[in-house]
Amino acid sequence: MSFRPFQDPPFSLGNLQEEMSRLVERVWHAGLSTGPFDGQKWAPIVDMYEHEDRYTLFVEVPGVDPDEVEVTHLGQTLTIRGEKHRPPSVSEGDRPIRGERRFGKFCRSVDLPGDIEAARLSAKYHGGVLEINIPKSESSKPKTVKIRVEEK
């Protein structure tokens, strides 16, 4: 299997810019301690897909109680807020020997690529993944134009 640092050929400056943007986004919100930058200890990882009639956002929030997650929409931005608590069996004074998991409040905002029908937003939680379905507005859906052929 060959190593490919970038997604798909053909290589172009546009593809490089998109890949660098994704890399920065991953580093910024991949659960790393980004306290000096945005004040958070962690933020969930997000994938977004576009379908013909909707966008789907998958947010990894393992160990987060779904009742502690809030999804809000304002303009072109969807925001996911919540908090991941330490296990009750661990007290503040306990000395960690290894600490790879992150705890605390998080806030993750995602810019949407088109207009949506906010009243029809829906979310479900399964296996530590929050799935948010975001219906597109009619103006954001693809349109088919019939081509008229004129005789000479």
Image (cartoon, rainbow, N blue to C red):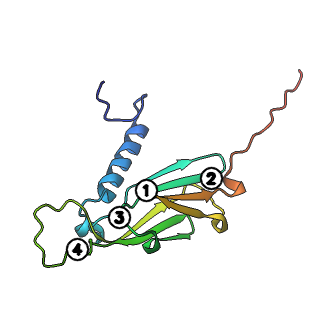
Q: Residues within 10 Å of mark 1 (few under 14, many from 20)?
A: few
Circles 4 and 2: CB distance less than 8 Å?
A: no
Q: Eyeballing the image, is 79 above or below 19?
A: below
- From the viewer's perspective, tell me whether residue 55 is left or right of residue 101: right
Q: Eyeballing the image, is 59 above or below 5?
A: below
Q: Quadrant of the N terminus?
A: top left
On residue 54, the disc is 2
Marks 4 and 2, Cα distance to the nearest angstrom? 42 Å
Marks 3 and 1, Cα distance to the nearest angstrom? 9 Å
Query: What amino acid type is highlighted by mark number 4?
Result: Ser
Circles 3 and 2: CB distance less than 8 Å?
A: no
Q: Position of residue 145 (x, y in %)?
A: 77, 39
Work out whether mark 3 precedes mark 1 in sequence or the reverse, and give the earlier one.
Answer: 3
Say which residue label 1 marks: 127
Circles 1 and 4: CB distance less than 8 Å?
A: no
Work out whether mark 3 precedes mark 2 in sequence or the reverse, and give the earlier one.
Answer: 2
Nearer the observer, 134 or 37: 134
Nearer the observer, 62 or 106: 62
Under circle 2, the secondary element is strand
Say which residue label 3 marks: 63
Work out whether mark 1 precedes mark 2 in sequence or the reverse, and give the earlier one.
Answer: 2
Work out whether mark 3 precedes mark 4 in sequence or the reverse, and give the earlier one.
Answer: 3
Circles 3 and 4: CB distance less than 8 Å?
A: no
Residue pictured at 40% horizontal, 30% vertical: 11
Under circle 1, the secondary element is loop
Q: Residues within 10 Å of mark 4 (few under 14, many from 20)?
A: few
Query: What amino acid type is highlighted by mark number 3?
Result: Gly
